[in-house]
Amino acid sequence: MFQDFLRRLTAPAPKSLNEIDSRLALGALLVRIARTDGDYAQSEIKQIDQALMARYSLSATDAAALRAECEELESQAPDTVRFTRAIKEAVSYENRLSVIEALWAVVMADGVREHEEDSMMRMTASLLGVSDQDSHSARIKVSGK
């Protein structure tokens, strides 16, 4: 299943994502940001589940099952560019801001902002076409500071 999804995602001219593929791409991106610093903390896992529950109106069980699929997908995915390209093409700018907020919430979930996470967030925001100012505002919004 994931190989077919990755093949479609990495095609020279990928088609817009359907709802299931959108969920997988976003979830895998959330997992990727959580794993960036080498410490996939329980608080980050919980935050990913909460983001998936809120965004897709899922139960806790369904969100955890989706996250598990996304963890597998993320481990097989070649790079972040393809996830972000697919999300950028499938999601309006306003909704991409909510993606950035969800990513910042995962980064902040363990209470520590590592250099690797900051670098990944700068790259991801840029690839999603979200300005540095809007990414900064999203970080302030989710962190409360």
Image (tube, rainbow, N blue to C red):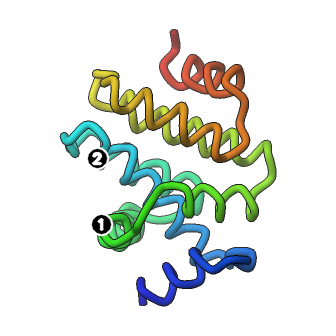
Q: Which residue is mark 1?
A: 75
Q: Residue furthest front?
A: 12
Q: Please tell me which of labels 2 and 1 falls first in the chain.
A: 2
Considering the numbered disc 1 on the image, is that residue within a helix, a strand or a loop? helix
The disc label shown at residue 35, or none: 2
Q: Quadrant of residue 33?
A: top left
Label 2 amino acid?
Arg
| Residue 57 appears in the figure | no
In percent of width and height, residue 13 lies at 73, 77
In percent of width and height, residue 99 lies at 61, 45
Q: Is residue 12 above or below residue 63?
A: below
Q: Quadrant of the N terminus?
A: bottom left
Considering the numbered disc 2 on the image, is that residue within a helix, a strand or a loop? helix
Label 1 amino acid?
Ser
Q: Identify the residue at image location x=38%, y=52%.
A: 32
Left or right of 44 on screen, residue 80? right
**Towards the viewer: 5 or 101:** 5
Crowding at mark 2 (Cα within 10 Å: few <14, some 14-19, many 20+): many
